[in-house]
Every structure is written in structure tokens, then in C-alpha cells.
Amino acid sequence: MKLYNLHAYAFLKTPTEKLKLPVGIAHQVLLMSSGEISALVEPEVCLDTIQNDDERLIKAVVCHDRVICELFQQMTVLPLRFGTSFLEAENLLAHLRANTQEYQEKLQQLQGKGEYLLKCIPRKLEEPVLSAESGGRQYFLAKKQHYQTQQDFYILQATEWQNVVHLVTESYQSTIIIASPGAESRIYLLVYYQDEPLLTNHFLNWQKACPRWQLQLGKISPPYHFI
């Protein structure tokens, strides 16, 4: 027996103006409201069937993100993880009633802000071309020199990472840092929409201060990591 649920995309303040609601995974999404807080949901979604089919699951996850992004372009939202669902409408409404104050406070904190991803990718030191034909001692000294150069490079690279973290957190209090030593690290920033030009300027300065890292700044997105 297939169990159909209300698939939930996001919580938001009950809108005072009509929103443009997109099509979801299989059906038109709709708003369900309980006082000042509403939920964007899609009825009759069978998650069990979707999760047993990799192709459908990937498409559903991409669709879930698309719906949240389309709503985010219209107003502040609390995005929900894929798979968040409620068995019945009354369960959802009871949840909204019980958590109204918490969601109101979170939405207020996020008002007018979006999430940006700063990727920090460590650059690699170019390997020198060493020829063993140049002689044993000379070859050994060249290898030793490269090893020392490599160690100095990584020490400076680690220092630059600490520097970029300092620069970012100095400018933006709301950050989430996911460091992966020796690999791509990520910094999530919560920034006001109107401050994007300033963020772009900061980004250029961060890159200049950290030449041993390749920095990539993503586009604005719903505040997935700040809810």
C-alpha cells in the first residue's frame, strides 16, 4: 500500500499578496496557513516510491531545490530538507501553531538576507622537471630543494587560510566554516541582498590576500545553512 504525504518545501510568513506558486515534483504546490505562519506543500507525494528509484530521486531533489529558489525570489523563507513531510493537513497545522513564535523569530533574522557560498580551493605547487641524467648529487640536491620549497609553500598556504577566515569573519558575523585540510573548504555567508556589490569587492580583496588559494563566490541562494 502506497502512503501519500504532504511534501513540505518551506515555512514562511503568511503572505499578504498573492504569490506565484510553481509546479512541484508531480503536482501544483499550495500554501497551507495557520495564522501568521504558512507552509508551502505538495499533496499526494509518495516518497517511498521515489526513494526506490535513483533517477526519480535525483529529479525530485533538484525539483525540491528549484521550488524553494522560486519562492525565495519572492519572499523570505525557511527552506526545509528534502523528505520533510506530514501525514495529514491537521498534523502540519498543529506543527505550525506549536512553533509559530520560533519560526517568526527565525524569519525576522533572515529578512532581506541570502546565503552565499565561498569555495576555497588550495592551489598545487608546480612540480619541477628533474632529470636523473644530470648527476646523482645534483639530482639529489634539486629534489631536496624542491621538498623545502614545497614545505614553505604549504606553511604559507595554511597561514593564508587563517587569514581568509579572519578577513571573512571580520566583515560578516553570520558565517559557517567547513574546513577540509588539503582539499576544498567552504565558507557560507549570510548577507543582505543590497550588500552584494560590497561582498564582491571583499571577495576580490580576499583573493589578492590569498594567492595560494583559488576562491570562488557562488550566487545568492536560500539560507539553507542558517535555519
Image (cartoon, rainbow, N blue to C red):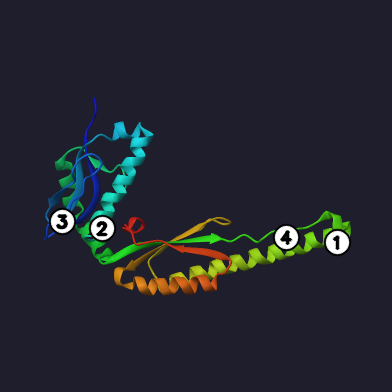
Q: Of marks 1 and 2, which one's residue comes earlier in the chain?
A: 2
What label does residue 19 carry, if any?
A: 3
Q: Of marks 1 and 4, which one's residue comes earlier in the chain?
A: 4
Residue of label 4: 128
**Label 1 to label 3, Cα distance in Å?**
73 Å
| Nearer the camera: disc 2 or disc 4 | 4
Secondary structure of residue under mark 3:
loop
| Nearer the camera: disc 1 or disc 2 | 1
Q: Could you tell me which residue is drawn at 30 percent across and 31 percent down?
A: 49
The answer, for residue 178, to whether it is visible in the render is no
What label does residue 72 carry, if any?
A: 2
* Three-letter code for the amino acid on which mark 1 is drawn: Gln
Q: Is residue 80 above or below residue 169?
A: above
Q: Could you tell me which residue is drawn at 54 percent across and 68 percent down?
A: 162
Q: Could you tell me which residue is drawn at 56 percent across and 57 percent down?
A: 181
Viewed as shown, does residue 71 lie left or right of 128? left
* Three-letter code for the amino acid on which mark 3 is drawn: Leu
**Label 1 to label 2, Cα distance in Å?**
62 Å
Secondary structure of residue under mark 4:
loop
Viewed as shown, does residue 10 lie left or right of 187? left
Labels 1 and 3 touching (C-beta < 8 A): no
Q: Could you say where residue 94 lies in the image, as x and y percent from the top left?
A: 16, 46
**Label 1 to label 4, Cα distance in Å?**
14 Å
Residue found at the very far top of the displayed protein: 1
The answer, for residue 151, to whether it is visible in the render is yes
Q: Could you say where residue 2 lies in the image, as x and y percent from the top left?
A: 24, 28
